[in-house]
Amino acid sequence: MWDALWIGGRLASMAAEDPTPYGAIEDGAIAADGGRIAWLGASADLPGPPESLARQVHRLDGRWLTPGLIDCHTHLVYGGDRAQEFEQRLEGATYEEISRAGGGIVSTVRATRAADEDTLTATAKRRLTALLAEGVTTLEIKSGYGLDLDNELKQLRVARRLAEILPVTVRTTFLGAHAVPPEYKDRAAEYIDAVVAMMPEVAASGLADAVDAFCETIAFSAEQTAQVFEAARAQGLPVKLHADQLSDLGGAALVAKFQGLSADHLEYTSEAGVAAMAQAGTVAVLLPGAFYALRETKLPPIEALRRAKVPIALATDSNPGSAPVTSLLLMVNMACTLFRMTPEEALLGVTRHGARALGLADSHGTLEVGKVADFAIWDIERPAELAYRIGFNPLAGVVKSGAA
Ligand code: DI6
Ligand code: FE
């Protein structure tokens, strides 16, 4: 007997081997046992009457069932907000100008340092609840607003705690090299030494699954980023990178050289960067919410990524500065509208490829036997509706580790 069985629905498996669009199975059934997918296929192929096969039988009544959605790049845990800078930008200031004048990321650092863990948990929980309401079952959360060991660990602890209070899988990323903190103003090189010195303790804490950095003219150089990556490698931690968002510092090629999980943003990535990613198997994570909020006009190299068969994931980049976003479905829409991705590519970006960007390709992101039974159930007629609508939530239910 399986724990649970869903019948009479349409499945979008998103599985790689399946050549049908979305890996679709019309009139499908899917079973969960011990939190994993135990069986899926056409209802007609079920090995017996449903009630004889599972302790619980759920009827989907023609609804679509997809893998639970994956948001593989967020900065969900932070203090305060930056609505005031939003106003400043509307009065003509640029993101870079605000950042150089001591606002931007550094102002969120002040607010995050001042906040205790309960406050950070409560504010992040509200944002996370909004994401979960659209079918997200796994997300990544970065530190990067603490910028000293204690405050970075505080953010990572809060990120992990969120997975204890809500039905979600959280992967955490240490982003100590996000910005130069005020006490190191104009001493970026020394701050990088401090980040390198934090690495063994971050690793020993067990609170980080990966390491990220912001490689940019307003943040850290490629050389400084490489120092952080060397330190991560010494601790056996995989890396990823905020790469080529505002200018081309060769970030994509750099993270590929370190066999990185993902290179994120990529608006200014060159053909050489794309080729390096393809060779290393590094996932491209596109962040249309930041592109939109910063009114960027330079498109990421979608066609080159396609040609090189680099998997493309999508995420919210949820953060108080460049992407105050808590809707992954809106990112799916924007990837189509702004980046001209197809609805199928966009859905792959928040399922299979999102899982791969988190190093979870073997356990998450598709409907396949043996994978974790994380599902989103949708009141839609076809999967393209998930990309087509703007500001409408057709979620009908979520299954997390086999539990409805
Ligand atoms: N790139 C981004 O888009 C965010 N961080 C980064 O490195 C912005 C974070 C912020 O403005 O607070
Ligand atoms: Fe980011």
Image (cartoon, rainbow, N blue to C red):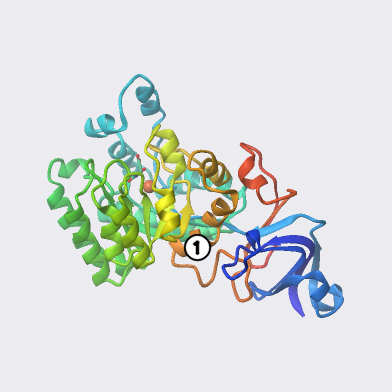
Whether ligand 2 has any atom under 8 Å from the Cβ at mark 1 is answered as no
Give percent across and percent down for residue 78: 40, 44
Q: Quadrant of ligand 1?
A: top left
Q: Quadrant of the C terminus?
A: bottom right
Front position in the image: 305 or 104 = 305
Q: Quadrant of residue 43?
A: bottom right
Q: Residue reaching furthest top? A: 91
For the point 41% across and 39% down, the residue is 291
Element under label 1?
A: helix
User: Seen in the image, is 160 located left or right of residue 37?
Assistant: left
Front position in the image: 285 or 108 = 285
Label 1 crowding class (10 Å Cα cut-off): few <14, some 14-19, many 20+?
A: many
Q: Is residue 262 above or below residue 386?
A: below
Name the residue that disc number 1 marks.
Answer: 355
Give percent across and percent down for residue 238: 34, 67
Residue 74 visible in image = no
Q: Quadrant of the N terminus?
A: bottom right
User: Seen in the image, is 249 located left or right of residue 83?
Assistant: left
Q: Is residue 251 above or below residue 18?
A: above
For the point 26% across and 56% down, the residue is 149
For the point 22% across and 65% down, the residue is 231
User: Seen in the image, is 99 located left or right of residue 15?
Assistant: left
Tag 1: residue type?
Ala
Give percent across and percent down for residue 120: 43, 46
Q: Quadrant of residue 41?
A: bottom right
Give percent across and percent down for residue 312: 46, 56
Front position in the image: 304 or 329 = 304
For the point 62% across and 52% down, the residue is 135
Residue 393 visible in image = yes
